[in-house]
Amino acid sequence: MIAVEDPQVPEFVKDLQAIDTYAELREILTSQDFEMAGAAERTIFLEDTLIMSEGQRHSELKQLSAPLFSRQALAYYELHLFEPVIQQVLKDAQDNVDANGRVRLDAVALIKSALTRISAGVTGVDGVDTPEGTERFRSLVLQLGEATTGIFSAIPHAEVIELGKEALNQLVEEFLRPSLERRKALAARDTPKEDMPRDLLMTLCLANDLSHPDDDEKIPYVWRQCALFLTGSIKTTSHTLPHIVFHIDEWIKEHPEDRDKLLDTAFLHRAAAEAFRLHQTSPVRFRRALRDVTLNSGRKVSEGELVAMHQPRGNLDVAVWGEDTRYFNPYRDVPKGMQPWGLTFGAGVHTCIGQNLVTGIQNKGDTKHGTHGTAVRLLKALYERGAELDPDHPPQKATGTMNDRFATMPMILNAS
Ligand code: HEM
């Protein structure tokens, strides 16, 4: 089994005080003495969104979007969004049947396609239901996401920002504006609430929260809200899910007695959570101290100081997870009071709002009420079709990026 390594970080991060134990990371994330911080590009694209706001404004924005992630909303999405999308992408993949009657596909591409459509559904973007529409939309969101995380990009900074702005303009013209206009018309017609789509754009329409006085000087408010939902959901989930598939394959090779568990949702939940612990979407995050602080460990942080939050290293902390922390183990004992995925979805006020969408609400999930989350739903659909990694073409990691992700993962499925 392969040991997980620490991710690479940009050079300037090495000049900042490094926070890399689980205890200190959690203390800072849940402390009122620190605020969200990050590179300037986050302000250009994400100003006054959940992730970039604090205090009262953060509470208001959270109150607005929280109903989209309620237990009831999740059950609705699982039946009306996840299942149809997963079945459709698997159907689209049936074109590539080999001489032995087996389907050959790239799991990275399939996962991206499914997740792009699901994220579009939650954000309220129409026109993403064909392979061509999905691909066009996804490439624009990826270009935008490259800009919002520009500090990790290999492209020069000014260039990546311009490319991000161009991508957002195209997204607005081709997808977001027409989707918003349709929702405005629904709201104006007094459509019964149960017949309206459940998504971010509809929520903003109904709350009449679509513009801000500074919209002429900046990227308009409503598109910034969409930018956060799209970049916060597509890249994150589609980068992480292939890691689960990879680790499960590794595990089954070493523990063939567990092969039957591939259809057991409890096992898949454990496997997904353990892979989430081992792989995070960002190699490092940032927080700024609002006053002079002494942490429980005795570490001192000065007012105004920017600290580097090495969350991937915190999730590998031997003191918490044990000596075998860098190795995938779906049966790992989770320390009391902790999440099995550690800090992968954050902690404190900025904890990921989409977490339940991805992980489901554990122990409560069943097919009828559906709260398994995108990860387990997608894995189960693949293993029901006998999914296995192509033994002749091993998966390849992405190069030229600090993001921990696979570029390709050839997979074989049974034809249905
Ligand atoms: C594997 C998938 C995902 C991972 C690993 C992930 C991770 C995270 C993390 C670590 C944060 C906190 C950032 C910080 O504290 O600096 C966050 C925040 C956020 N995530 Fe996710 N995320 C995922 C999927 C999603 C999805 C599907 C959505 C759906 C829209 C989403 C929307 C958001 C939003 C809006 C925030 C800001 C929350 C706030 O500041 O209050 N994420 N995510």
Image (tube, grey):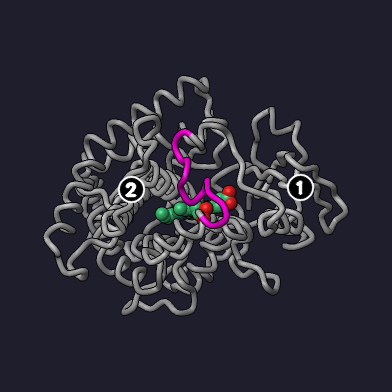
- Residue 170 as seen in the image, left or right of residue 160: left
Q: Is residue 70 at all visible to an observer of this figure?
A: yes
- Residue 130 as seen in the image, left or right of residue 122: left
Which image quarter: residue 383? Answer: bottom left
Q: Position of residue 66 (x, y in %)?
A: 42, 64
Q: Amino acid at mark 1?
A: Arg
Q: Position of residue 209 (x, y in %)?
A: 33, 52
At horizontal 84% and vertical 47% (from top left) the residue drawn is 300
Residue holding disc 1: 291
Sort mark 1 into few (<14), some (14-19) or many (20+) by Cα contacts within 10 Å.
some
Q: Is residue 246 at all visible to an observer of this figure?
A: no
Residue holding disc 2: 116
First to last magenta residue range: 44-56
The label nearer to you, 1 versus 2, is 1
**Beta carbon of the mark 2 residue lies under 8 A of ligand 1:** no
Instruction: Give yes or no for residue 46 being in the magenta stretch.
Output: yes
Quarter of the C terminus within the rendering: bottom left
Residue 132's label in the rendered image is none
Q: Amino acid at mark 2?
A: Thr
**Beta carbon of the mark 1 residue lies under 8 A of ligand 1:** no
- Residue 341 as seen in the image, left or right of residue 313: left
Q: Nearer the viewer, residue 127 or 377?
A: 127
At horizontal 83% and vertical 59% (from top left) the residue drawn is 296
